[in-house]
Image: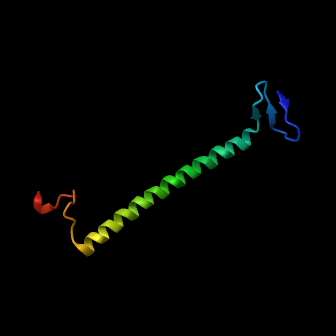
Amino acid sequence: MKRVEGHKHLFRDDSGAIVNTDTTEYLQYVKLRSERKKQKEEIEGLKKDISEIKSLLMEIINGPRQNSTRVDEQDV
């Protein structure tokens, strides 16, 4: 492999692909990607929670929905 001019950790292999040999930078990238994924999942969970709260508030204001799939205690 030949070093890419001006870059300490970049090399070009025989197929022409650029290879980064900086493991510290790679591990930082993996950690950041994992943190972003976790944040995205947390945001999606919060969106679902807010949607459920909104639905429950609307039910309190407007009364129970007629097409509700929830089973009331009286029906049991």
Q: Compared with residue 45, is residue 12 higher up or lower down, i.e. above or below?
A: above
Residue 58 sits in quarter: bottom left
Q: Residue at 22% across / 60% down in the picture?
A: 68
Residue 62 in the image, given as x and y percentages of width and height: 24, 73
Is residue 74 or residue 61 the one in the foreground?
61
Is residue 30 or residue 68 the one in the foreground?
68
Residue 49 in the image, given as x and y percentages of width and height: 39, 61
Q: Residue furthest right?
A: 5
Q: Compared with residue 7, is residue 12 higher up or lower down, i.e. above or below?
A: above
50 displayed left or right of 23:
left
76 displayed left or right of 56:
left
Which quadrant does the N terminus fall into? top right
Q: Residue at 20% across / 60% down in the picture?
A: 67
Q: Residue at 70% across / 41% down in the picture?
A: 26
Residue 3 sits in quarter: top right
User: Total of numbered circles in the picture?
Assistant: 0
Residue 12 in the image, given as x and y percentages of width and height: 80, 31
Residue 50 in the image, given as x and y percentages of width and height: 40, 64
Which quadrant does the C terminus fall into? bottom left
Q: Residue furthest bottom?
A: 61
Residue 20 sits in quarter: top right
- Colouring mode (rainbow / by chain / secondary structure / one colour): rainbow
Q: Compared with residue 52, is residue 8 higher up or lower down, i.e. above or below?
A: above
Is residue 18 or residue 25 the one in the foreground?
18
Q: Residue furthest top?
A: 14
Is residue 15 or residue 70 the one in the foreground?
15
